[in-house]
Image (cartoon, rainbow, N blue to C red):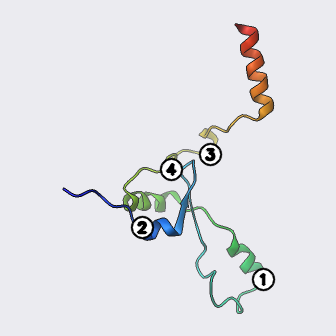
Amino acid sequence: MSKNKSHKGLLKRIRVTKTGKVRHRMAGHKHLRSGKGGQRLMQMRQDPYMASADTKRIEKLLYRRLRGRTQPKSAMRRSPSPAQRRAAREAAKTSS
């Protein structure tokens, strides 16, 4: 049986972040820009995140799980700052 192939056209149009969120380009951004206002064009420059329901469809096209798709933002771990790392290292030294 052949292997499942990920959707190459989709991979060219999206970016998957480390936390599993999917970024994409706004529709209507590339052409017929003269009829659109400046504020609208500025908002279109920002890459929006895709909703969780849509990322579920994308998982099926890519044949892989997107990490953290259903996690709330509060549950995701943040990397400690250098000051926090130093404090943790000092605490580990004093306890041992």
Q: Looking at the rendering, in which quadrant would you find the C terminus?
A: top right
Q: Quadrant of residue 84?
A: top right
Considering every residue shown, the one lying at the far top of the view is: 96
Q: Nearer the viewer, mark 3 or mark 1?
A: 1
Q: Position of residue 56 (x, y in %)?
A: 43, 57
**Helix, strand or loop at disc 4?**
loop
Whole-angstrom CA distance, mark 1 to mark 4, is 33 Å
Which circle marks residue 8 in the picture? 2
Whole-angstrom CA distance, mark 2 to mark 1, is 33 Å
Give the class, few, some or many, for how many residues have Cα within 10 Å of label 2's Cα (few <14, many ≥20). few
Q: Quadrant of residue 77?
A: top right
Considering every residue shown, the one lying at the far right of the view is: 83
- Indicate whether 5 appears above or below 43: above
Q: Residue at x 74, y 28 (%)?
A: 85
* Pointer 3 or 2: first along the chain: 2
Considering every residue shown, the one lying at the far left of the view is: 1
* Pointer 1 or 4: first along the chain: 1
Residue type at the position of mark 2: Lys
Considering every residue shown, the one lying at the far front of the view is: 2
Give the class, few, some or many, for how many residues have Cα within 10 Å of label 4's Cα (few <14, many ≥20). some
Identify the residue under disc 3.
73
Q: Position of residue 36 (x, y in %)?
A: 71, 87
Give the class, few, some or many, for how many residues have Cα within 10 Å of label 1's Cα (few <14, many ≥20). few
Q: Looking at the rendering, in which quadrant would you find the N terminus?
A: bottom left
Which circle marks residue 38 in the picture? 1
Which circle marks residue 69 in the picture? 4
